[in-house]
Amino acid sequence: MESLRRNTQLILALDVTDVKNAIRVSKDTAEYVDAVKIGYPLVLGTGLGIINDICKFAPVIADFKVADIPNTDHLICSQAFEAGASAVIVHGFTGRDSVLECVRTAKKYEGDIFVVTEMSHPGAVEFMQPKALELASIAVECKASGVVAPATRPERVRQIRGVVENLTIISPGVGAQGGSAADAIRAGADHVIVGRSIYGSKTPGIEAEKIVKEIEKCR
Ligand code: O7M
């Protein structure tokens, strides 16, 4: 694992859409986060250069949920790593060849790939849940660095942990979506991903610190 320190076990989901807010929240929370996850809302709102700006505060995970043919996957991942990302999040449902190409590309940059398994929202039970353990095993086979698993369903995090063994599990769905940081960590997540509860607060640093303290208690 190149991209993530495992210190606070908190990853900030920076889903704001303007540079000023992005810098303010990143600065305020920098001492409490192991990484910042940046996805379409912020990159489409500000441009890809925002990755380099936020890198100054913490390693950046580019959440582009890459899901294409291998050649296009390679092009997308390369752009994210060239822009300064330490890791890229990809889907696994496109198959082993696509995931393998992402992992191959990441290696060139000494970066990491995280594969989405079962998502945290209610609709994930329709198509993703029945295939989640298979998606997790594709991540293992393709030598990805880790997987994304739902903090809203700690029992599923536990089952996914059983499949991925020592891969890193990053887990969204804490706070605004109803999941608990402590439950996700106890179920086997290495990091929780938190967005709105932190960036939506007037005091993002204080909110981040609260979550870090909650995690510390269950270690
Ligand atoms: O704490 P929130 O709900 O405001 O934000 C959660 C973040 O995690 C947000 O950026 C989502 O897009 C993302 N996410 C999920 O909420 N659920 C998932 O299953 C997967 C992700 C994610 O990051 O995928 C890689």
Image (cartoon, grey):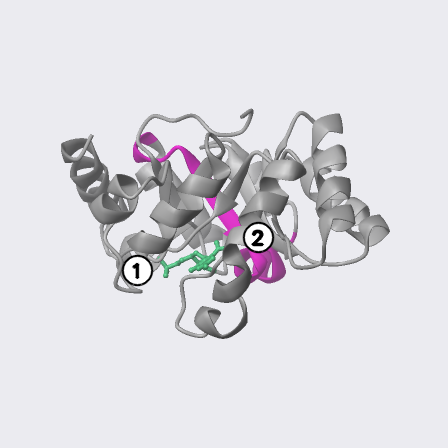
Which label number is shown at residue 98?
A: none
Kindly state the secondary structure of the residue where label 1 is placed. Answer: loop
Q: Quadrant of the C terminus?
A: top left
> Which residue occupies the extreme left position in the image?
217
Task: Identify the amino acid type marked 1.
Answer: Gly
Q: Is residue 186 above or below residue 219?
A: below
Please give the residue where the numbered disc 1 appears in the rendered image.
200
Q: Position of residue 145 (x, y in %)?
A: 57, 34
Q: Is residue 28 above or below residue 98?
A: above
Q: How many marks?
A: 2
Q: Is residue 111 above or below residue 119?
A: above
Left or right: residue 124 versus residue 90 is left
Mark 1 near ligand 1 (CB under 8 Å)? yes
Left or right: residue 176 versus residue 97 is left
Please give the residue where the numbered disc 2 appears in the rendered image.
134
Magenta stretch contains residue 42: yes
